[in-house]
Image (cartoon, rainbow, N blue to C red):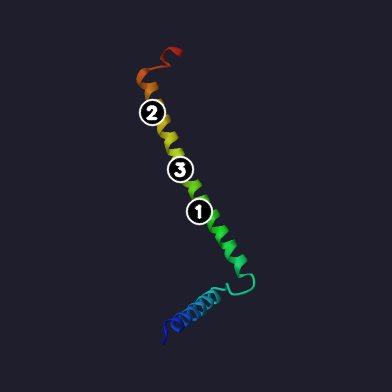
Amino acid sequence: MPRAEFEELLERVAESGARAALAEVGLDGENAANDIRELRGLLDAFNEAKRTAWQTVVRMITTGLVLALVAGAVIKFELFKGAR
């Protein structure tokens, strides 16, 4: 089998396999491209929400540690003892 013919056959088989895989998951209709774009958008939104949640957790932990350090300094140096 000549190389060009083999590559053409391989391309047709790959395309057929890709179409079958898309059909198996329900992405074979006219709206398949829109469905895939929507899925990508949902995945991007989920990843953004996950990133924001982690940033919030880190910010809360950092704020808690800073407040604990400030409270420790206030107690250590008795800064508000004369205010009573």
Q: Position of residue 2 (x, y in %)?
A: 42, 85
Mark 1, residue position: 47
Where residue 4 appears, x then y in whole percent? 45, 81
Q: Which residue is mark 2?
A: 69
Q: CA distance from mark 3 to mark 2?
A: 18 Å
Q: Secondary structure at mark 3?
A: helix
Residue 69 seen from this side: yes
Which residue corresponds to the image point at 50% horizontal and 53% vertical from the top-left?
47
Q: Earlier in the sequence, mark 3 or mark 1?
A: 1
Distance between the alpha carbons at the discs numbered 2 and 1: 33 Å
Q: Is residue 11 above or below residue 36?
A: below
Q: Residue at x 42, y 36 (%)?
A: 62
Taking the view exactly as shown, the residue that stands out farthest to the bottom is 1
Q: Which mark is residue 62?
A: none
x%, y% of residue 49? 52, 50
> Residue at position x 57%, y 65% from top?
36
Q: Are marks 3 and 1 in contact (CB under 8 Å)?
A: no
Q: Are marks 3 and 2 in contact (CB under 8 Å)?
A: no
Badge 1 element: helix
Given the image, on which type of amino acid does mark 3 rest?
A: Val
